[in-house]
Amino acid sequence: MPYNVYRGIGSPEAIDWVTPVEVCAAGDAELTITGAGHVADTVYYYGVKAESDAGVESEDETRICRVVIDSEGDLAGQPPAAMVFCILTAGAAGTVTASWRYDQTPGPYGIAATIEAAIVTDDVADWESPIGSWTVVGSARRDAADLTGTYDDGRLLTVAIRAKTAAGTAGPETRASCLIDATAPVAVEYIAAEAAE
């Protein structure tokens, strides 16, 4: 049973499921594609369909791989999926807590190893100096953490958060903002009552 390989540029929806670019022989677990004409700074999507010995092809169009060609024309690693959400909460004395969720999405995505956060200034995230980094355990992580540093009263703080693979390939940013209240009192941690004698 051979496998037909199809390709599209820019999105999974762009895959041409009519004309195969390669055919993988029956019994082969992998295929090397050469001379495919990959162009620098381009994202390709490859899809695979099985074909029976009778020539009937599967209708399943969900077996897709994302291939990124970087600005040098080299193959880049698969980026992980975007964060499900990110929320910033301003605390007392200019502190900030980030809450987020990441799920490993089935499909053409890399496996996330870490989550990292960076401050956004003039619409650019400072990934050279992240303000937090957390390990992904298993296929998902939902967590909250205090971000390093304190921030000026009245500042509208914007933070970008993203997942990264162990090889360092980053996924898309998710951004969140909050207004800093450095004059807010420190929250009461607990209250206890005792019976008087």
Image (cartoon, rainbow, N blue to C red):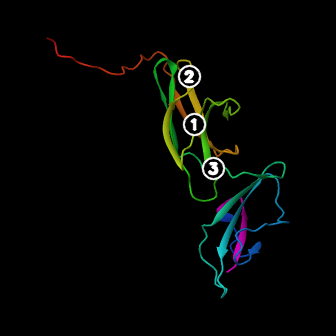
Numbered disc in front, either 2 or 3: 3
Mark 2 element type: loop
Report crowding for label 3: few under 14, some 14 to 19, many 20 or more residues within 10 A (C-alpha): many
Q: At 68% across and 73% down in the image, what residue appears?
A: 17
Instruction: Out of 49 and 10, give the one closest to the viewer.
Output: 49
- Looking at marks 2 and 1 on the same chain, the residue that comes earlier in the sequence is marked by 1
Mark-to-mark CA distance, 1 and 3: 15 Å
Q: Nearer the viewer, residue 178 or 136?
A: 136
- Range shown magenta: 1-12
Number of the label disc, if any, that sits on residue 80: 3
Give the alpha-carbon distance from disc 2 to disc 3, as whole Å: 31 Å
Q: Amino acid at mark 2?
A: Arg
Q: Residues within 10 Å of mark 2 (few under 14, many from 20)?
A: few
- Is 12 located above or below residue 161 in the figure? below
Q: Which quadrant holds residue 31?
A: bottom right
Q: Earlier in the sequence, mark 1 or mark 3?
A: 3
- Under mark 1, the amino acid is Trp
Coordinates of residue 163 in the picture (x, y in percent): 61, 43
The residue identified by callout 2 is 155
Q: Residue 150: x percent and y percent? A: 56, 20
User: Residue 8 lies in magenta, yes or no?
Assistant: yes
Q: Amino acid at mark 3?
A: Pro
Mark 1 or 3: the one toward you: 1
Q: Quadrant of the C terminus?
A: top left
Residue that sits furthest to the bottom in the current view = 54
SS at badge 1: strand
| Mark 3 secondary-structure assignment | loop
**Quick check: 197 left or right of 144?**
left
Q: Position of residue 61 (x, y in %)?
A: 61, 70
Q: Which residue is mark 1?
A: 134
